[in-house]
Image (cartoon, grey):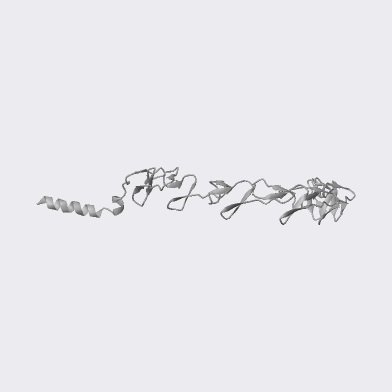
Amino acid sequence: MMKPMLLALALSLATAIPASAQTDAPPANSHASAYGDGWACDYGYESTGAACLAIALPANARLRARGDGWECVRGFRSDGQACRAIILPEHAFLAEYSGGNGWECERGYVSRLDRCMEVAIPANAFLNDRGDDWECERGFSREGNGCNVLVLPEGAYLNRYATRGWECGRRYMVSGSACAAVIIPENAFLNRRGDGWVCEHGFARVAEACAAVILPENAHINAAGSGWDCNPPYRRRDDVCVAA
């Protein structure tokens, strides 16, 4: 008589256990997670909810370094389901980091849709460092599809890194499409760049001239040389130095 009662009690206890507690056990082909509680699938298996299934490799694919997925071998590209062979156009080569094409054009060619077109280099030009365009030779400027002779204004020199192709020489400054001579006023000297001027120590710039700094009582020329500070313990109040 006791056996049926014990069996009924065991069944009632089993049904009372929460479903989550029954599924806490790690599935086959898994191991304890390295990042806290839980589990992770073994190398070569992927998680599908509560199970770890072997990763099915399509043709021309291999497991990723982490072993949790696959990637195509060199010369093939994934379409999400399979690895398709990369078709190389003429004058192209396989390239891993090519923005999705899987290939890049050889030096002297440029990508145009699914082809590699030869870079047409005009007269007085040469292939650029990347090999996919051209630059004008020194003394020429790019205009449209050609290179025109660069006309230098007086006081200028060629500079390939300048937008206009030239820079003004020392003691000259850019003025529109020309170089204007720097006129240095009295009590001034040429600046470090050579394209302007700076007032001497004790003088301040006023329009296009240098005016002497006027010191109030108990003051001295400041470190910049173009103004003044009060002598300690005096402090500045408007244009005078007053006792602290």
Residue 208 lies left or right of residue 128; in this view the side is right
Residue 172 lies left or right of residue 86; in this view the side is right
The residue at 43%/51% (across/down) is 82
Residue sitting nearer the eye, 76 or 29:
76
Is any part of residue 244 visible from this angle? no
Q: Residue furthest right?
A: 186
- Residue 69 x/y as whole percent: 42, 47
Is any part of residue 236 visible from this angle? yes
Residue sitting nearer the eye, 103 or 34:
103
Residue 217 lies left or right of residue 87; in this view the side is right
- Residue 40 x/y as whole percent: 38, 45
Residue sitting nearer the eye, 220 or 167:
167
The residue at 22%/52% (across/down) is 13
- Residue 58 x/y as whole percent: 41, 48
- Residue 209 x/y as whole percent: 87, 53
Q: How many marks?
A: 0
The residue at 23%/52% (across/down) is 14
Residue sitting nearer the eye, 215 or 21:
21
Q: Residue furthest front?
A: 90
